[in-house]
Amino acid sequence: MKSNYENDSKFAHDVHKIGALAFLAPSDVAQGFDQLYSSLPSLLEPLLDYFEDNYIGRRRPNGRMSNAAIARRAVEH
């Protein structure tokens, strides 16, 4: 993935789109993430999964969100 990022400008641009989620309203992040997930190359799935687990939280079958690891750590400290 590192060499793709360094040598493929479109791939690097796709990676930057993930960080752009920070500029969305909190209520729009999950929908924006879903749109990105379905539009980005499958090579980015491990990075997207990490981002979802640690910054967004996984959606459960009942529609509720699990707490993201970063949010849990912030509450614990």
Image (cartoon, helix red, strand yellow):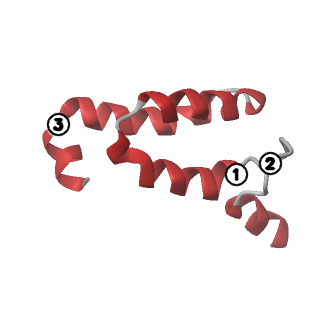
Rendered image: mark on residue 65: 2
Q: Which mark is first along the chain, 2 or 1?
A: 1
Q: Quadrant of the C terminus?
A: bottom right
The label nearer to you, 2 versus 3, is 2
Dot 1 amino acid type? Arg
Dot 3 amino acid type? Asp
Q: In the rendered picture of this protein, how many numbered marks are placed on residues?
A: 3
- On the image, numbered disc 3 is attached to which residue? 8
Residue 7 placement, left or right of 59: left
Dot 2 amino acid type? Met
Q: Is mark 1 on a helix, strand or loop?
A: loop
Residue drawn at x 49%, y 39% as measured from the top left: 19
Determine crowd level at label 1: few under 14, some 14-19, many 20+ residues with C-alpha closer than 10 A. some
Mark 1 in CB contact with mark 2 (< 8 angstroms) = yes
User: x, y (%) of residue 64?
Assistant: 85, 45
- On the image, numbered disc 1 is attached to which residue? 58
